[in-house]
């Protein structure tokens, strides 16, 4: 299964130890934020991309924690030295 470049970048960040956190703001709008392993926020993740990754079962949350990459996500991501450029 082919994945888009944006999906590839997010999965690569997660494979290196990143996480996706999901929460709601004051107006009950769903907000998702992606962080790399050092804690820096990756600004190019939106709700559409988040839902695509969930639908493909590339990410999952355990015990209401942050979303992490799954084994299926690891198979989808192509191994490259640095894919964030």
Image (spheres, helix red, strand yellow):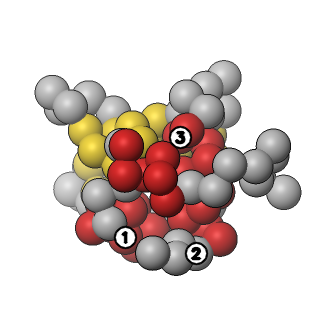
Q: Secondary structure at mark 1?
A: helix
Closer to the N terminus: mark 3 or mark 2? Answer: 2
Residue topped by disc 3? 14
In the picture shown, does residue 70 fall above or below 37? Answer: below
Residue topped by disc 1? 52
Residue drawn 55% across and 38% down? 15
In the picture shown, does residue 18 fall above or below 47? Answer: above
Q: Residue 35: x and y, percent?
A: 56, 37
Q: Is the Cβ of the residue at disc 3 closer than 8 Å to that at disc 2?
A: no
Q: Is the Cβ of the residue at disc 1 closer than 8 Å to that at disc 2?
A: yes
Residue drawn 81% across and 43% down? 81
Q: Residue 16: x and y, percent?
A: 61, 33
Residue topped by disc 2? 4
Image quadrant for the C terminus? Answer: bottom right
Question: Residue 21 has which mark?
Answer: none
In the picture shown, does residue 56 fall above or below 13? Answer: below
């Amino acid at each position: 299964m082919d994945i888009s470049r944006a999906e590839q970048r997010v999965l690569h960040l997660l494979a290196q130890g990143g996480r996706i956190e999901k929460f709601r703001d004051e107006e009950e709008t769903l907000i998702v934020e992606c962080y790399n392993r050092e804690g820096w926020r990756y600004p190019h993740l939106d709700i559409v991309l988040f839902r695509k990754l969930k639908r493909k079962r590339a990410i999952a949350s355990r015990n209401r924690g942050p979303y992490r990459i799954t084994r299926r996500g690891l198979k989808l991501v192509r191994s490259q030295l640095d894919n964030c450029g």
